[in-house]
Image (spheres, helix red, strand yellow):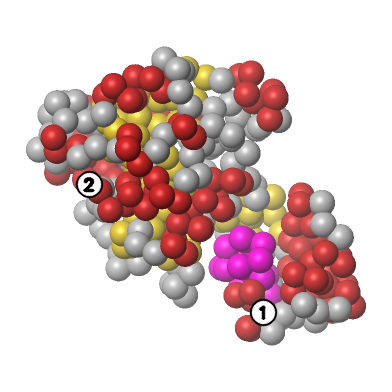
C-alpha cells in the first residue's frame, strides 16, 4: 500500500495508473480542466455531491475519498490493485485467520445477498481490476450462482451504503471442477449450465470466484460469514476451491489449511501480474474444529 496525504496525490496517481490526462478526467466529471488542476493542487475541495461521483468514476472506495477530501485530510494507505485501504501501515495486512475464527459469530447488518444488476456490475468491475484473463465475468453466471447459493454470494456496504466488497461462490459438480483442476478448461469458460444444487451432490464443490473488501473490518465480516457457513453446514464431504491472483492471500490460504494445486507463472509473465494465478483446494474441517 502507498500512503496518500492529499486528494491531489490520489487523483494524480489514479491518472498515472490509468494513463489518463487531466482533460480525460475533466470530461468524465463534466467539468473544465481548471477544476481538475485545482483539485490536484489541493487548492479547493470537492463538493460533497462530487465525492460519490468520484467514487463511481474511479472505483476508489468512498471512505478513502472522504478521508482525503477534508480541510484537515486523514492520511490513508491505499492499494489500487487490491482496492483496499488502511489508516496505518501496521493494519494493512489481512488479519490472522485464528483471530477471525474466534469472532466468527460477530456480524453486521451491512451484509446482504447479491440481488441486483448494480451489485454484479461492481463485482465484474473488481474482477477486471485483477488483470487475470482466466476469471469469469459473465453477469448471467454470477446472477445464477447468487440465486442458487445466496448464503455465499454476498455483498458488504460501508456505513454510507456504498459498495465495499463481496464474495462470489460458484456451486460446481466434482466433474466440472476436475476439468479446471486438470486445466482442461478455464474458469471464464464456465456457464450457467455448469452450476448445480450442492445439496444434491455427493461431493459438492464450492468454487470461490472472488472474495474482497475495501478494508480489514469489512473483510472480517465477509470471510466470517463464509467460515460460519462451513462451520454450520451438515456437509461432511465438500471441496473448497479458490482461483486467485491476489498477492496478499498467501498467508491466509496457509492458515486456513487449503493446499496449492497449481500456479500459473507463465500467465504472470505474459499479463505482467504482481502474483501468479493460483488454484487452492481443501476444506475447513481441521481449521474450524
Out of 158 and 114, give the one closest to the viewer: 114
* Coordinates of residue 74 in the picture (x, y in percent): 64, 69
Say which quarter of the image contains residue 28. Answer: bottom right
Q: Residue 228 bears which disc, if any?
A: 2
Disc 2 secondary structure class: helix
The boundaries of the magenta stretch are: 54-70
Q: Is any atom of residue 286 visible in this view?
A: yes
Instruction: Tell me: 16 left or right of 187.
Output: right
Q: Which sits in the foreground, 171 or 100?
A: 171
Q: Is residue 202 above or below residue 130?
A: above
**SS of the residue under disc 1:** helix
Per the picture, the main secondary structure of the magenta-coloured stretch is helix
Q: Are marks 2 and 1 in contact (CB under 8 Å)?
A: no
Decide which of tag 2 and tag 1 comes sooner along the chain: 1
Query: Residue at coordinates 54% horizontally, 45% vertically from top-left?
Result: 127
Residue ID for mark 1: 50
Amino acid at each position: 500500500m502507498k500512503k496518500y496525504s492529499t486528494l491531489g496525490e490520489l487523483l494524480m496517481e489514479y491518472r498515472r495508473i490509468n494513463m489518463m490526462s487531466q482533460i480525460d478526467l475533466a470530461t468524465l466529471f463534466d467539468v473544465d480542466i481548471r477544476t481538475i488542476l485545482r483539485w490536484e493542487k489541493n487548492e479547493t475541495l470537492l463538493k460533497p455531491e462530487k465525492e460519490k461521483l468520484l467514487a463511481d468514476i474511479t472505483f476508489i472506495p468512498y471512505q478513502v475519498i472522504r478521508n482525503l477530501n477534508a480541510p484537515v485530510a486523514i492520511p490513508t494507505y491505499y492499494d489500487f490493485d487490491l482496492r483496499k485501504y488502511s489508516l496505518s501501515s501496521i493494519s494493512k495486512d489481512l488479519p490472522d485467520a485464528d483471530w477471525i475464527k474466534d469472532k466468527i459469530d460477530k456480524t453486521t447488518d451491512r451484509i446482504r445477498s447479491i440481488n441486483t444488476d448494480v451489485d454484479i456490475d461492481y463485482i465484474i468491475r473488481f474482477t477486471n481490476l485483477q488483470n487475470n484473463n482466466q476469471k469469469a465475468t459473465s453477469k448471467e453466471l454470477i446472477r445464477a450462482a447468487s440465486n442458487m447459493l445466496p448464503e455465499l454470494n454476498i455483498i458488504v456496504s460501508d456505513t454510507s451504503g456504498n459498495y465495499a466488497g463481496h464474495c462470489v461462490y460458484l456451486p460446481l459438480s466434482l466433474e466440472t471442477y476436475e476439468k479446471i483442476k486438470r486445466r482442461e478448461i478455464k474458469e471464464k469458460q464456465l456457464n450457467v449450465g455448469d452450476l448445480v444444487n450442492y445439496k444434491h451432490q455427493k461431493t459438492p464443490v464450492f468454487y470461490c470466484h472472488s472474495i474482497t473488501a475495501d478494508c480489514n473490518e469489512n473483510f472480517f465480516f465477509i470471510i466470517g460469514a463464509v467460515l460460519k457457513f462451513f462451520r454450520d453446514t451438515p456437509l461432511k464431504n465438500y471441496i473448497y476451491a479458490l482461483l486467485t491472483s491476489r498477492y496478499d492471500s498467501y498467508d491466509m490460504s496457509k492458515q486456513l489449511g487449503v493446499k496449492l494445486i497449481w500456479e500459473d507463472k507463465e500467465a504472470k509473465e505474459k499479463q505482467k501480474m504482481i502474483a501468479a494465478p493460483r488454484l487452492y483446494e481443501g476444506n475447513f474441517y481441521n481449521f474450524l474444529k
